[in-house]
Amino acid sequence: MFNLIQAARASEVWRAPKGAFSPILQLSGFGRVRVVEERQLTLTFFDDFSQQLCTDGKCLVQCETHWYLGSPSQLHVCPSSHEVFAREFSSAPFAAALFASVGMRKLLQVHSAEWSIRSIEVKDEENKTRVKLLQFQWDATRILFTCALRGYEQDHLRVCDLLKRADCKQSESPLLHTLRNESGFVHNPFPAKPVFTVPSNGTLGLTVCAMAAELIANARRCEHGILTAPDDIEFLHDFRVNLRRTRALLAVASPAFSPNALADLKSRLATIMGKTGELRDLDVFMSSRTQLEDLVPPTLRSGLPAMFSAFSHRHAETLHNVQNFLTSKQYQIEIAHLYQAFLQPEDGLFSAESSRPVGEAILTRLVKRTGKVLRAGTVIQADTPDEQVHELRIECKKLRYLLEFFGSLLPDDIYPTLRKALKSLQDILGDFNDCSVQQASLTRYLEDITDVNQHQSVGALVQALYQRQLHYRQRVEGGFAEFESYRPLAVLTGVQRQFAKENNK
Amino acid sequence: MKILACYSMKGGVGKTATAVNLAWFAASSGLKTLLVDMDPQGASSFYFRVKSKKKAWNDRFFESYKVLLEHIKSSDYDNLDVLPAHLSFRHFDVNLSNLEKTQNRLKKVLKGFKSEYDLIVLDCPPSISLLSENVFRAADVVLVPVIPTTLSERTLEQVTDFFKDQDLPTKNLLPFFSMVQRQKHMHADTMARLQGSKRKVLKSAIPFSADIEKMGEHRAPLGEFGKSKPAFIHYRSLWNEVNTALEST
């Protein structure tokens, strides 16, 4: 009987030449060949939106009653129900292996193919099966899987030799990967944060516009997910990240644009961001429900369900509004206008600065921005007001964007070090800010609430978030000192000098 | 991992047919199963069309499970492997007597399969010997086919006495009626007498059947050619009882 688990653990996978290849004919010289089963099998392949499983060399298949998660070294199997998130799978090792790639992202069907399958046995003169084969056929593609039976390994080797002589090519991928790749699947990953390779001698204006067009196009790829799979909150997050990065790109390259055009583009972007900001905050809040509940002592939790219920209602309303907005004509016109403005920039868009070589212009900005971060960080002490910590956070963010956009201008050994140093500091500042935003949102919520239970519970939650914020606040100085210890200003000034030297030759 | 022995000191009582069919039922239910054909006649190996290597290797059988691994072969059925018999297995008693700790060698060697198999079925040769004692000490259940006749009844008594003499757990002995012909008065009387006694006999009884004999012709377990036959249904019932007994050990 055909068994996909055994097949997926196949010892050898072969691609047969297209055309009149018949394993039965090829193997008849070896022994009696018998087709024991013929059937159709639909294999449905899943991945998250960014196709992270495929990028990680994994392959998730749903077939009949089971899920199969294959990697080059392992196969996990789990009975299938209606799972769409890694956390929903009943087998813990399966869920863990899946989560390692897709995290909280929703599983989406990325490919499906119906294969004709033949189970073939090669028998000896006593009718004992010596070798088992499975032939998968899709269109003109034939994949053969051969299985070495215990005690009959020599026979298996002989069959493999026959297949080789019949021009079959051994697949380097496991069976499931081969079946996916050979049935027309195209790996089309979604890079939530595209990596740019910037030509150092290109002009600032055109380089930035090409990057912005790519970011807008990337944001647009998330629209469908926000409309059809909003329970995967990463769609909205990635949508906003790409627009925010576009805005940041305009800010770091602002001298390249004419003031009026820049103000117009920024305002259009701000409108879209403004329409989606509350939903993102609510997404984060609702998805951290368990962690937030855990912050409140059990005796004070009685008011939390009502609060989460209110936020859940608000979330549903906000989602509805966002979805309406994204399908509106107004949005379609705005986003198309933005994309077009960057894709085919018109004369009025640029200032005289736009024709500067991008390398020279950006390295100057990088040095300046790093100086600003260092100035903002040096003043932070234990009693510095929170506003100044927020200022440092914003400066760090701008520097990170600059590094991410134009990292390819820096030598290979410098960019990853600087980025890593900045990330540690930013993680602390990000957690500090999240606590602050959530406290503000909860305090606003309490203004309209009269229920004593809710006041007690939400009050306790605000208090816990405040304690957390203090904890992160205490780590800011240490994080900054670590960043400073990399001597980023000296490093970047050195790069700038070297760049100038090379380009003046 | 559990070990089930199909044993009788008397020949021709249905040990091999029982071992082959129960191994098939176990494998079909998803248990990774190994059938060890210890009878030099090699009838189980014949049923599964599995041949041993030509060279005699009886003197290495009790060395380690790794030696056994080299001789195991896949059957044609999922989850079922066979360790085929070799004519040289007739010297097992001599081989065992030359070793230390002679009574527990089989148990020790089979322990190595713990991570590989869920069930080992031993098809034993008809004798009562040092090898049999090894089987009794290794097996969780010793399944004894008993033809409901005076002679078979007597051999069951002899095995039971042997267990008592050697201080072996008699609760592991599970007799069942085999090759039953109810139309024969002797069979009916013997069954009634034994079932009425204190001795525990399994409820399932295997009838004398041409279909079981046909296993030799088909060289396959009943489940592969006679699923609608009464004998198949009786063996299924026997497997259910044996499986319950194995689970409770």
Image: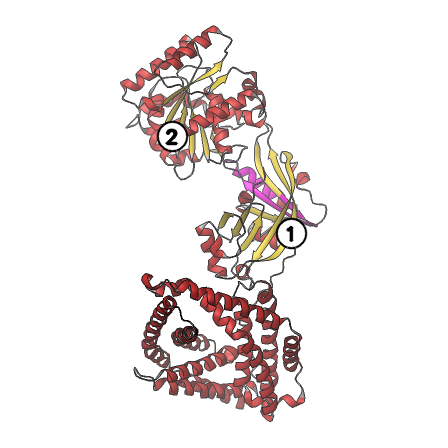
- Looking at numbered disc 1 in the image, what kind of residue is underneath it? Ala
- Looking at numbered disc 2 in the image, what kind of residue is underneath it? Arg
Helix, strand or loop status at disc 2: helix
Image position, residue A309 (x, y; %): 46, 64
Q: Which residues are magenta?
A: A135-161
Task: Specify the subunit that label 1 lies on.
Answer: A
Relative to residue A77, is residue A385 depicted above or below?
A: below
**Residue B134 lies in what quarter of the image?**
top left
Q: Which is nearer the eye, A9 or A427?
A: A427
Instruction: Give the Cα distance between marks 1 and 2.
Output: 51 Å
For the point 45% across and 13% down, the residue is B147
Please say whether residue A136 is one of the residues in the magenta stretch: yes
Q: Residues within 10 Å of mark 1 (few under 14, many from 20)?
A: some
Numbered label attached to residue A113: 1
Numbered label attached to residue A309: none
Relative to residue A463, is residue B231 depicted above or below?
A: above
Please say whether residue A406 is one of the residues in the magenta stretch: no
